[in-house]
Image (cartoon, rainbow, N blue to C red):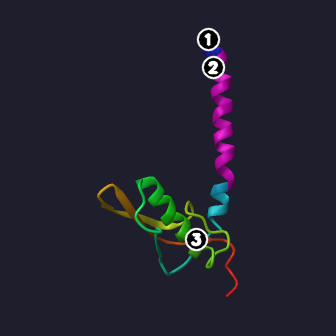
Amino acid sequence: MLKAAAPIAICLAAALLAGTAAPLMAAADLQCSSEEIRARGVGFLPSRKESQDAAKKIWLEKAIKVFTDATVETAKDPKMGCAKQGLYTNCIMAAFPCGTVKAAE
């Protein structure tokens, strides 16, 4: 059984490395803004996840005005803070947007 599992493990490791090689190379081309962007969700929402997603969405709308290919995943030093009031939550995201394509000014 070990003989059969070894090729599968090798293939899995190769697939994982192949999937991460492109993002690592692209990371070398990333530039980050010197100004941090802050974004608050649309108000208090019934779940923390909804509030976090709302803050990320609004942050991303602002970030693509700096780098057109900015994402939450490529942001530098991301921070998320949430306030709870009763059953409702409102979140704020702050991060430096990063990307490879600067937006037109």
Residue density around tag 2, few if under 14, some if 14–19, many if 20 or more, within 10 Å: few
* The residue positioned farthest toward the bottom in the image shown: 105
Instruction: Give the farthest residue toward the top.
Output: 1
What range of the chain is rendered magenta?
4-22
Secondary structure predominantly adopted by residues drawn in magenta: helix
- Reading the image, the residue beneath label 1 is 1
The foreground one among 40 and 99 is: 40
Q: Is residue 31 visible?
A: no
Q: Amino acid at mark 3?
A: Cys
Q: Which of the 4 quarters of the picture holds residue 14?
A: top right
**Tag 2 secondary structure:** helix
Query: How many C-alpha atoms fall within 10 Å of the one at disc 1: few (<14), some, or many (≥20)?
Result: few
Q: Secondary structure beneath disc 1? A: loop
Total count of labels = 3
- Tag 2 residue: 5
| Magenta residue check for 20 | yes
Asked if the residue at tag 2 contacts the one at tag 1, i.e. Cβ–Cβ closer than 8 Å, the answer is yes
**How many residues crowd around disc 3 within 10 Å: few (fewer than 14), some, or many (20 or more)?**
many
Where residue 70 appears, x then y in whole percent? 62, 69
Closest to the observer, 96 or 22: 96
Quadrant location of the N terminus?
top right
Give amino acid for label 1. Met
Is any atom of residue 5 visible in this view? yes
In the picture, measured across the screen, residue 65 lies left or right of residue 58, that is right
Real-space CA distance between mark 1 and mark 3, rounded to the nearest whole angstrom: 47 Å
Residue placed at 66% from the left, 16% from the top? 4
Looking at numbered disc 2 in the image, what kind of residue is underneath it?
Answer: Ala
In the rendered image, which residue does mark 3 sit on? 98
Residue 57 in the image: x percent, y percent? 55, 65
